[in-house]
């Protein structure tokens, strides 16, 4: 345990602050924006969390590429803990008496104010489901990314980074969507197994599009991190 904590502290010293900020921001943002649906049909469901979730997986790919899968997973747990802290603060804010600025609509103030409180306050089973799904998918993404890298003959280059990221992101996002659907949508909202599977696939495809678009940026960041590592200590496998 002490060794793990020590390794994690050493990693935090070398991870660029911007990458740390983006990771935490992505995890907090995707859980908050997941409250707003974009599409909600029997065979397809997308929410605004997609605007942030790609960022979380891209940062995990960068961390895995530079530090190894175990370190990236520990970092994901760290981001999740901070997200739970923020969720607690949001919950307290929703219980503090007061009025949201957007609730001033004549005749609907109470309804809108309650809706906003409930949105930021969150629901326990949604928070539990999203947290579980994220940790499981982070483990799948990080170790799959690492494993693919070990199988490739080419050790460097954007093509290697992209292949690792595309495959791990698609499968990681599929697992994330499926676990959440099984724990939340199926149990609490009565989704069928077909709905869970189709929405998991379509959501993963949408996330993969973001990964393809932003992977060149992720590769450049990973190269800069490696260049700044004065004394590379190898991957934390």
Image: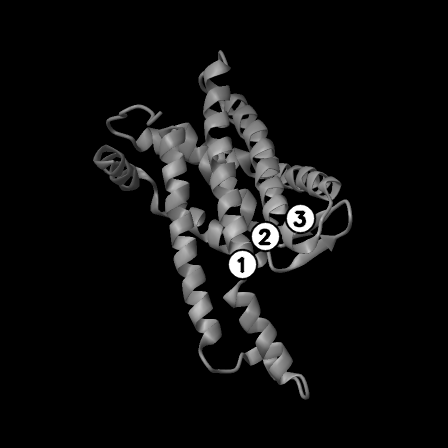
Q: What residue is shown at x 23% (from left), y 33% (from top)?
A: 3
Q: Is residue 66 left or right of residue 49?
A: left
Identify the image quadrant of the N terminus: top left
Mark 1–mark 3 Cα distance, whole angstroms, equals 21 Å
Up-down relation of residue 20 to residue 237 (above or below): below
**Mark 3 crowdedness (10 Å alpha carbons): few <14, some 14-19, many ≥20:** some
Label at residue 186: 3
Q: Mark 1 and 3 residues: CB-CB less than 8 Å, in contact?
A: no
Give whichever of 129, 81 is nearer the camera: 129
Give whichever of 76, 19 is nearer the camera: 76
Name the spot of residue 157 as percent of width and height, x first: 48, 21
**Residue 58 seen anywhere in this rendered image of the structure:** no
Mark 3–mark 2 Cα distance, whole angstroms, equals 19 Å
Name the spot of residue 65 as percent of width and height, x first: 42, 28
Name the spot of residue 45 as percent of width and height, x first: 71, 49
Identify the image quadrant of the C terminus: top left
- Count of number-bearing discs: 3
Name the spot of residue 124 as percent of width and height, x first: 51, 59
Q: Is residue 137 left or right of residue 65?
A: right
Point out the tag, 1 or 2, that comes first from the N-terminus. 1
The residue carrying mark 1 is 32
**Mark 2 crowdedness (10 Å alpha carbons): few <14, some 14-19, many ≥20:** many
| Residue 35, quarter of picture | bottom right
Q: Mark 1 and 2 residues: CB-CB less than 8 Å, in contact?
A: yes
| Residue 93, quarter of picture | bottom left
Label at residue 49: 2
**Mark 1 crowdedness (10 Å alpha carbons): few <14, some 14-19, many ≥20:** many
Q: In what element is the residue under mark 2?
A: loop
């Amino acid at each position: 345990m002490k060794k793990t904590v020590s390794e994690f502290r050493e990693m935090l010293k070398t991870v660029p602050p911007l990458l740390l900020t983006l990771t935490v921001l992505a995890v907090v943002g995707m859980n908050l924006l997941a409250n707003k649906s974009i599409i909600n049909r029997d065979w397809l469901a997308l929410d605004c969390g997609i605007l942030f979730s790609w960022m979380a997986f891209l940062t995990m790919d960068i961390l895995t590429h530079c530090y190894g899968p175990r370190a990236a997973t520990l970092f994901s747990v760290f981001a999740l803990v901070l997200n739970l802290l923020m969720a607690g603060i949001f919950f307290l804010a929703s219980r503090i008496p007061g009025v949201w600025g957007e609730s001033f609509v004549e005749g609907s103030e109470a309804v809108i104010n309650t809706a906003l409180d409930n949105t930021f306050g969150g629901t326990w089973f949604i928070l539990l489901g999203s947290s579980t799904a994220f940790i499981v998918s982070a483990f799948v993404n990080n170790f799959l990314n690492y494993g693919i890298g070990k199988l490739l003959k080419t050790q460097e280059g954007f093509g290697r980074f992209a292949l690792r990221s595309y495959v791990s992101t698609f499968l990681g996002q599929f697992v994330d969507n499926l676990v959440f659907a099984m724990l939340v949508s199926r149990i609490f909202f009565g989704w069928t197994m077909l709905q869970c599977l189709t929405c998991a696939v379509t959501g993963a495809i949408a996330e993969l599009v973001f990964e393809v678009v932003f992977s060149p940026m992720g590769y450049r960041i990973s190269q800069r991190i490696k260049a700044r590592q004065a004394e590379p200590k190898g991957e934390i496998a």
